[in-house]
Image (tube, rainbow, N blue to C red):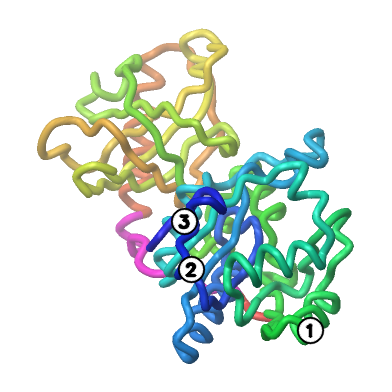
Amino acid sequence: MRIYRSLADVAADFGPSALTIGNFDGVHCGHRRILRDLKALAGGKGWKASVLTFDPHPTRVVAPERAPRLIATPARRAELMQEEGIEQVLILPFTRELALLSPEEFVAHLLVERLGARAVLVGDNFRFGHRQAGNIGVLAELGRKLGFETVVVSAVTCRGRVVSSSAIRELILAGRVSLAARLLERPYDLDGEIVSGRGVGSKQTVPTLNLATAAELIPARGVYVTRTHDLESARDWKSITNIGYRPTFGESEELSIETFLLDPLQGEAPHRIRVKLLWRVRDERKFETPEALKGQILRDVRVAQNYFRRARAWVGRVPCISS
C-alpha cells in the first residue's frame, strides 16, 4: 500500500480512483463496511481503492476545545486500512486553509483534479466543505456535473445503536473493552516501548513488561485479560495487564501499564509491544501489603488462564449487526 502525507507527494498516477473520505478513527465496523464496498467497486472497474483522511483531526483545527482523544494514530489507521485491501492512502495535513474551502472547491480541485476520483463512497452522515456546508445531496449533484459516481453506504448498528467512533471512545474509557472490540471488529490495543518497572510480577516468576505508550485513549483503571504482541519479532503471548497508579505502593502520579505474561518469553525481552485488551477482570485495588498484592496477581493469572481455556483466542472478527 502506498501512503502519501501531502498533496505534493501524490503520484501522478494516483487516479483513476474509487475514493472514500473521512477521519476513520479506530477503523471500526462501520468504516470497514465502506472500505470493503470501496475495494469491491474499485476492483470491478479497474480503479485504485483509495482513502483520503486527515491529520490532525479537523476538530483540533476548527474547534480545539471539542477535539476528541483519538482511538488510533494515523499510522495505525493506515495499517488497518491495508488489512482491508486499500491500495493507497493520503493522510492530508488539515489546515485552516483547507477548512475554508467551499464544497465545490473541495470536490473539484482536490477530489477530481488531484486525486482522479471516478467514484466517491461515503457514509450517510457525510459532511464536507467550509462550515460543513456540503452533504450527500451536494456531493451527488457535484458528481453529476464533474463526472464521478456517488455511493452512499448505510450505517452499521450494534445493540440498536449506530456504531460511531465517539461511542467506542466512551466504551474504552469505561473499561468496556469486550464490547468495544465488537464495534472495532478487533481488540482495542496499546502500542509502545518497554520501560523498567517495580518488578512485582517478576518476583513471583511471572514475566512482566511495563509499557510506555503515546496512546491518547487509556481504558479505565483495572486489570484486563490481554494478548501481548512483539512488534519486532511477531512473538505473541497470553497475558494480563494492570492499568493504574500502583496504590499499594503509595499513589503514583504516573499511570502504569504493567503486563504479566502467561507464556514463557522464549528469548530476550521485547523492546516494542502491542497489548490487545480482551476483557476487564476487576477494578484496581489497594492491598495492605505487597504480599497480598502478589497473591492477587496469582489469582488474576488463574482467572486469565481460565478465560483462555473457555473462550477461544481472538481469531478473525466479531461482526456487528447491520441496520
Where the N terminus falls, by quadrant?
bottom left
Sequence order check: which comes first, mark 2 or mark 1?
2
Q: Amino acid at mark 3?
A: Ala
Front-most of residues 21 and 31: 21
- Mark 1 or mark 3: name the one nearer the start of the chain: 3
Percent position (x, y) of residue 90?
Answer: 53, 57
Please state, as top left, top right, bottom left or bottom right, where the C terminus lies in the image.
bottom right
Q: CA distance from mark 1 to mark 3?
A: 31 Å
Q: Residues within 10 Å of mark 2 (few under 14, many from 20)?
A: many
Residue bearing mark 3: 78
Secondary element type, mark 3: helix
Q: Image quarter for residue 271?
A: top left
Which residues fall within the magenta stretch? 308-320
| Disc 2 + disc 1, Cβ < 8 Å | no
Q: Is residue 153 left or right of residue 276?
A: right
Q: CA distance from mark 3 to mark 2?
A: 17 Å
